[in-house]
Image (cartoon, rainbow, N blue to C red):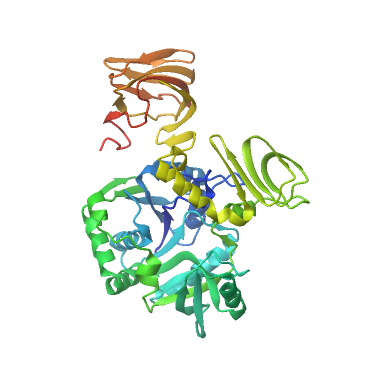
Amino acid sequence: MKLIPVIMSGGVGSRLWPVSRQTHPKPFMQLPDGENLIRKTFRRAADLDNVSEVMTVTNRELLFKTEDEYKLADRNVAQSFILEPFGRNTAAAVAASALLASNTYGGDAVILVLAADHLIKDEEAFSKSVNEARRLAEQGWLVTFGIQPQAPETGFGYIEADQSNPLGLGFKVNRFVEKPDLKTATKYLKAGNYLWNSGMFCMRADTLISELEKHCPEVLETTRATLEVSRLSEAHKHNTLTLDADAFGLVPDISIDYALMERSDQVATLPCNIGWSDIGSWNAMSELTNEDDDGNRFEGEVLTWQARNNYVQSSNRLTALVGVENLVVVDTPDAILVADRNNAQDVKHIVSQLKKTGHDAHLLHQTVHRPWGTYTTLEEGERFKIKRIEVKPGASLSLQMHHHRSEHWIVVSGMAKVINDDSEFYLNTNESTFILAGHKHRLENPGVIDLVMIEVQSGDYLGEDDIVRFEDIYGRTQ
């Protein structure tokens, strides 16, 4: 039977602000080893037995960023994407992947639901657990991966396993429990039959569809209706299903746990010890870095004097700590976080404040990724903005126009192909051109190395929404 790993990549990771932001969420954050979680997840999924395709459910805006990471993972496996126009929680995503897998491979295909932003250190143990979960799934169980708790953790949900009737290495689930207080979590740890809910699942597509029909038919039917009117793009070893926004908006906004797992009597759990972490806060992230004699953990250049039990991430500048304890300090080019380690979970409240005030710091970094490359805002003032633009070889920006700003382009390295109204020409290093407001224009990199440019914008309004796209190879004209 085919195994189809399904990578869910939709969360923002607000507790890891200011590094995790809406357009650069937690799965794409660089870890101390130089990689990120989504690349590790894809590689881990592609390396499992009998996998010929990895399916990813993500936001439309993250497709090209995800593709770049998968290329770096260097695995020869087919890829398919389900692109959501907006978040609709996990029940819709799981239902869509089951329906698509069933249509493509048949109802006996086994889907393995993985989170893009979880870390698994013991990949050999993970592979063995997946094989055992497949055996249970083929018997008709909806299998959850339960993590054997190492401490009375209050930040996770729990699974109560029925140990009276073992199912091979797994157990029938008695119930799911919400995040407990410390006293209850300590009780669960001593009981021995409570596991952390990892949010990973394994099940046959037809079993999942049948259980959805029984327990949450509205989710299934609205998701099925969405797939019927959505747009499928097929390419060599790469299919993309773009979900119709109007139809998808009718799907109930509910998690797969609430919609199905807590209602079905066909749910089993498989206890695992696979070095799992959801990297849910800066305290969890700090555990990936070695500590010094004073309990400090650092990424970047840091000096201390009588400082203890602190975590610092600062890759852009020297950071000094004097006489402080139990702090989290995270420095990015446009925002700095300073928090008590005991309040690391509360960073999400800062993100909520940023959203309410409309501040871009919850949404964008100073460097913004686009399908064609990146741009970095170097300086901004009244009526001007200066950017560094990097365009990948063979990539092209849209044919576009701005109402309120003009642009001056200077090539720093590489070669640029420029369309400026009726003119088409090339620019080499140290050459420049000027684009008047109201002119249709396009920038392309025809070379084999990155094109790096400086763009100086001037005008009455410099917002990113002052753009009219006429043609775009990435489908952004709709």
Q: Position of residue 73 (x, y in %)?
A: 51, 47
State the quadrant of the N terminus: bottom left
Tell me if I can see residue 67 in this picture: no
Task: Depth check: give the residue in front, 371 or 259.
Answer: 259
Task: Depth check: give the residue in front, 137 or 22.
Answer: 22
Q: Position of residue 205 (x, y in %)?
A: 34, 67
Q: Tell me if 418 is positioned left or right of 186 in this view.
A: left
Tell me if I can see residue 8 in this picture: yes
Task: Depth check: give the residue in front, 343 or 54.
Answer: 343
State the quadrant of the C terminus: top left
Q: Position of residue 33 (x, y in %)?
A: 62, 46
Task: Depth check: give the residue in front, 381 or 72.
Answer: 381
Residue at x 45%, y 77% (from the top left corner): 175
Q: Tell me if 348 is positioned left or right of 108 in this view.
A: right
Q: Tell me if 366 is positioned left or right of 53 in this view.
A: right
Extreme-bottom residue of the structure: 164
